[in-house]
Image: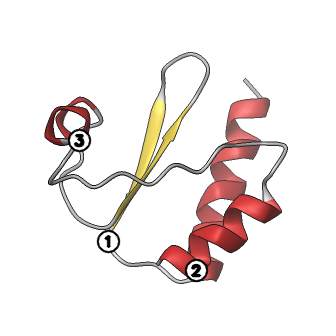
Amino acid sequence: MVPIMVDVSKQYVNQLNVIKIDVDEQTQLAQQLEVTGVPSLVLLGRSGTKSCLIGGADADEINHWLSNQLNHNTTK
């Protein structure tokens, strides 16, 4: 999934920051973010709201999910 996320971070460079964490090393952060499966993508908004995509996903699925989430957040 790392190569996909590198591409995603380039595509959405002005809209979001992509950060990778190791849930085994960052257990407290993983609990705060309510990570229940690996891999997980967690989208945090300015208001603290979030959305999660849990499990393996290909580039198209990730882009579709992000597009929906970012469009949803800008219409609020």
Describe the element under mark 3 as helix, strand or loop: helix
Amino acid type indicated by mark 2: Pro
10 Å crowding of disc 1: few (<14), some (14-19), many (20+): few
Q: Residue at x 78, y 63 (%)?
A: 10
- Mark on residue 55? 1
Indicate left or right for 63 with 35 as reference: right
The residues tagged by marks 1 and 3 sit, at their Cα atoms, a distance apart of 15 Å
10 Å crowding of disc 3: few (<14), some (14-19), many (20+): some
- CB within 8 Å, label 1 to label 3: no
Indicate left or right for 23 with 9 as reference: left
In which quadrant of the rendered view does residue 7 lie? Answer: bottom right
Residue carrying label 2: 3
The residues tagged by marks 2 and 3 sit, at their Cα atoms, a distance apart of 22 Å
Amino acid type indicated by mark 3: Ala
Q: Residue at x 64, y 80 (%)?
A: 60
Q: Is residue 42 above or below residue 33?
A: below
